[in-house]
Amino acid sequence: MAESQTGPAGPHLLVVLDHREARVYQAEVRGTVPERITPFDPHGYGRHLHSAHEWTDGKRPPERKSFYESIAKTLHGAAQVLLFGSGTGRSSAMEHLRAELTSHHADIARTVIGSVVVDAHHMTESELLAKAREFYTEFNRA
């Protein structure tokens, strides 16, 4: 098993992300409590990054950059970051985060070791963390 990275190298973080919130866990800590990041919701549409009420020309509105900036600040100093999300392509908040990190936070983007599509709404926190620890063990063994 890989040694813990909570020392000077920084923690191993798990980000479980959708369009409603991001939960950031220290993956190697048993019983970790996530830091929750929710997008600013000026219109009260249920904390989504976008809403049907905002659509005026049938095009998908841009994602709220402040949400991804808040996540990036939380990830600063991590040794490794693993992303869990649902959806694929343009509907994936996880892919939007990866693109934002690559474009604006290259140092943090380099710490992202993988992204996994999961059904996080049907998994307990314990199951998510177990899956993350398994991923980290396999990744660091290679």
Image: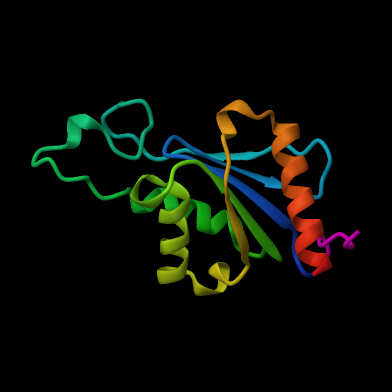
Say if 69 sits above or below 60 in the image: below
In the displayed structure, would residue 65 be above or below residue 43?
below
Q: Position of residue 9 (x, y in %)?
A: 77, 69
Tell me which corner region of the image, top left, top right, bottom left or bottom right, holds residue 41. Answer: top left
The answer to whether residue 13 is visible is yes
Q: Check residue 102 for magenta coloring.
A: no
The residue under the point 44% across, 55% down is 95
The residue sitting at 31% across, 49% down in the picture is 63
Residue appearing at x 42%, y 48% in the figure: 88
Can you see residue 27? no
Quarter where residue 31 is shown = top right
Q: Is residue 104 left or right of residue 27?
A: left
Horizontal and vertical percent position of residue 26: 73, 48
Residue interval drawn in magenta? 1-7
The quadrant of the rendering that contains the C terminus is bottom right
Quadrant showing the N terminus: bottom right
In the shown orientation, is residue 73 left or right of residue 77? Answer: left
73 is higher (above) or lower (below) than 18: below
Q: Main secondary structure of the magenta part?
A: loop
Q: Residue at x 44, y 35 (%)?
A: 20
